[in-house]
Amino acid sequence: GGKQAFLHARERRVKGYIMGISRDSLHKRRNTGGKQKPWRKKRKYELGRQPANTKLAASHAKDKKDAEGKLHKVTTGDVRLVRCRGGNMKYRALRLDHGNFSWGSENVTRKTRIMDVTYNASNNELVRTKTLVKSAVVQIDAAPFRAWYQQHYGKKIGIKVKNGEKVESEDIDEKRSNAVAKKLKERNAKHAVAENIDQQFVTGRLYALVTSRPGQCGRCDGYVLEGKELDFYLKKMQKKKSKAAAE
């Protein structure tokens, strides 16, 4: 009876005890395979925290005035402050749906909405659960870049093609001064957008790579995928899609 009572008490203690996350190497084996006996307790500076697992979602909507003074509902993310060693702060994003993305070849950056998580080299589960991490491939809203392109080059981008021909003209009919017309002509000379980027503008979404760490800095920023890097990820995504279809 006494032994049984002792075992029950021990079981209760174990159940109530939650293991801390530690980043120490005392418990690990050496390269030679030798084990080190734990000669000291855990230290505060060796602690680890739970992963942020930042989700692609809007937290709540707040009212924001536009240029004309009208109120609009704007969605915001959910970012928590974490006090760290030395009084430093980390910004733990739990939910985000916007970020600053740059279009490298055009040297332009815009704040835009993140629409979807499409690929992650480390884990497919992070795609299924729409988790935002560094190096994740996401789809972003192309509207801010389309608006900039039309204003900067004076012509449309992402026009639908039917039977090998564009449905509408690239040119925008509007009055321009000779100086502006000359400037646009110079900009458009020897300038062309890559075909795989133009096709994405037709769909209204662009593939981009996340370069910030949402769980550390509270932001989800990155750049638009282009060139060989875009081809590489498109190939990977197509391979994954065909593999899923075969199953």
Image (cartoon, grey):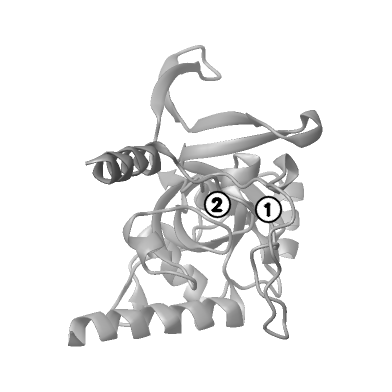
**Can you tell which quarter of the image residue 186 is in?**
bottom right
Residue 169: tell me if it is visible.
no
Return the x and y of residue 32 as percentages of the image width and height.
72, 86
Q: Are marks 2 and 1 in contact (CB under 8 Å)?
A: yes
Q: Residue at x 65, y 45 (%)?
A: 47
Quadrant for the C terminus in the image:
bottom left
CA neighbours of label 1 inside 10 A, class few (<14), some (14 to 19), many (20+): few
Residue at mark 2 to residue at mark 1: CA–CA distance: 8 Å
Q: Secondary structure at mark 2?
A: helix
- Residue at point 49%, 58% (across, down): 156
Type of the residue with mark 1: Val
243 sits left or right of 71 in the view: left
* Circle 2: residue type: Phe
Q: Which of the labelled discs sits on residue 108, or is there none?
A: 1
Q: Which residue is mark 2?
A: 145
In this rendering, the answer to whether 191 lies above or below 158 is: below
What numbered label is drawn on residue 191? none
Along the line of sight, which residue is nearer the eye, 120 or 68?
A: 120
Quick check: 134 above or below 10?
Answer: below
Query: Does residue 179 show up?
Result: yes
**Which residue is located at x 70 percent, y 63 percent?**
25
Residue closer to the observer: 188 or 20: 20
What's the residue at 63%, 58% (across, down)?
A: 211
- Left or right of residue 165: residue 246: left
- At mark 1, the secondary structure is strand
* Most foreground residue, 118 or 143: 118
Q: Quadrant of the N terminus?
A: top left
Residue 86, by quadrant, is top right
Q: Position of residue 67 (x, y in %)?
A: 56, 19
Mark 2, other Cα within 10 Å: few <14 / some 14–19 / many ≥20: many
